[in-house]
Amino acid sequence: MTDAEPFWKTKALADMDDAEWESLCDGCGQCCLFKLEDADTGEFALTDVACRYLDHDTCRCTDYVNRNRNVPDCVKVKPDNIAALRWMPETCAYRLLAEGKELFWWHPLVSGDPNSVHDSGASIRGKAISEDMVDDLEDHVVQQLNAQLENGVPPLGAPPKDPETD
């Protein structure tokens, strides 16, 4: 007797019931981070600033049922809009499945462990702050990048320095 394939491998996103759909969320919290969009290229960059309703330990919304009322521009991810949500993390199960890709090994549905997303480092646990701690998002991002530069962390997109020549 062989084991049946898991539902996410056999069902289209639009055919999943609510419980199946919700279980696709790995709880990484990346979708709750504030994003900056480059007006020229349309590329998105994640910040380390999260929605005030994000629980930074569980990486889940503290008021999920009322999230759209609390945060009017909070996007409800649905089968009919996931392809258009270019800012969703490349590791997001909704995005991966919509693109015909496999879930990562650390996804709780694959690993069987709800903490594997955190243990793998894929979640934002310990890596983000609440928007309530930031007065101006752009100033915060600039300060953060400057602090990284002062600590020897190259700016995003910069080629790594060769330790042999530096």
Image: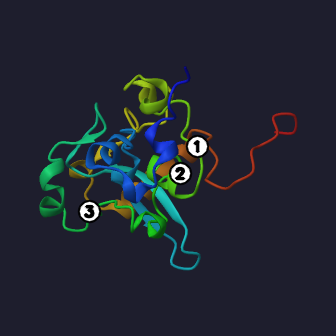
Q: Residue at x 30, y 63 (%)?
A: 75
In this view, the residue farthest toward the front is 1
Assign a secondary structure to mark 1. Answer: loop
Q: Is residue 151 above or below residue 78?
A: above
**Considering only order in the chain, which callout, 2 or 3, is on the residue closer to the N terminus?**
3
Q: Kindly give the residue lying farthest to the right in the view shown.
A: 165
92 or 100: nearer the eye? 100
**Residue matched to label 3:** 74
Residue identified by numbered label 1: 102
Q: Nearer the viewer, residue 76 or 159?
A: 76
The amino acid type of the residue labelled 2 equals Leu
Viewed as shown, does residue 64 lie left or right of 35? left
Q: Are marks 1 and 2 in contact (CB under 8 Å)?
A: yes
Across and down, in percent, residue 138 comes to 39, 63
Of residue 37 and residue 101, the one placed in the foreground of this image is 101
Residue 99 pos. (x, y %): 57, 58
How far apart, in angstroms, are the residues tagged by discs 1 and 2? 6 Å
Q: Is residue 123 left or right of residue 60?
A: right
The quarter holding residue 115 reads: top left
Horizontal placement of 21 versus 42: left or right? left
Residue that numbered label 2 is attached to: 96
Indicate whether 110 appears above or below 37.
above
